[in-house]
Amino acid sequence: MVESLAGAESLFGTKTSSFLVKTTTVLAIIFFITSTSLAFLSKQKSKSILDRKKDLLLKQEQSTSVEKQVEAKNSTSNNAKPEEKQVKSSAK
C-alpha cells in the first residue's frame, strides 16, 4: 500500500505516506466503533417488525378477551336483576 503513495511523497514530502496510513487507520477504527455502537443502540431501542406485529396481536387478543369477560359479567348481572325485581315485587 505504501508503494501506491509514492506519487504523494514526491508532492508533499517523505513523511506523507506514514501520515496517510496512520490517518486512514485512525479513521477506520473510528468508523468501526461508531458503526458498532449505532447498531447496538438501534437493537436496544427497537424490535423487528415481526416482533412488533406479534406484540400487537397479543394485545388485541387480550383486549378482546377482556371485553368478552366484561360482556359476560354484564349479561349475567342483567339476567339476575330482572329476577331480583320479580322476587322483590312478589314479596310486596
Image (spheres, rainbow, N blue to C red):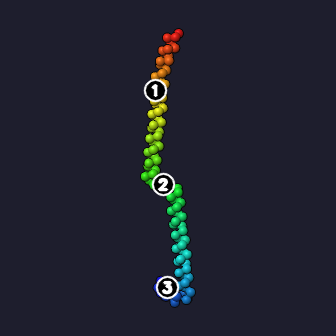
Which amino acid type corresponds to the residue marked 2 in the rendered image? Answer: Lys
The kind of secondary structure element at disc 3 is helix
Distance Cα–Cα, label 1 vs label 2: 40 Å
User: Which quadrant of the structure image shows residue 58?
Assistant: top left
Q: Position of residue 7 (x, y in %)?
A: 48, 88
The kind of secondary structure element at disc 2 is loop
Near mark 2 (Cα within 10 A), the count class, few <14, some 14-19 or many ≥20, is few
The answer to whether the residue labelled 2 contacts the one labelled 3, judged by CB atoms less than 8 Å apart, is: no
Q: Position of residue 12 (x, y in %)?
A: 54, 87
Q: Residue at x 54, y 67 (%)?
A: 34
Q: Of all residues shown, which one is farthest toward the top? A: 92
Judge whether 1 appears above or below 73 on screen: below
The kind of secondary structure element at disc 1 is helix
The answer to whether the residue labelled 1 contacts the one labelled 3, judged by CB atoms less than 8 Å apart, is: no
The answer to whether the residue labelled 1 contacts the one labelled 2, judged by CB atoms less than 8 Å apart, is: no
Q: Position of residue 33 (x, y in %)?
A: 54, 68
Near mark 3 (Cα within 10 A), the count class, few <14, some 14-19 or many ≥20, is few
Which amino acid type corresponds to the residue marked 3 in the rendered image? Answer: Val
- Say which label, 1 or 2, has the lower sequence index: 2
Mark 1 lies on residue: 75
Mark 3 lies on residue: 2
Q: Residue at x 52, y 65 (%)?
A: 36
Near mark 1 (Cα within 10 A), the count class, few <14, some 14-19 or many ≥20, is few
Q: Position of residue 81 (x, y in %)?
A: 49, 20
Q: Which mark is residue 47?
A: 2
Q: Which mark is residue 32?
A: none
Which amino acid type corresponds to the residue marked 1 in the rendered image? Answer: Ser
Distance Cα–Cα, label 2 vs label 3: 44 Å
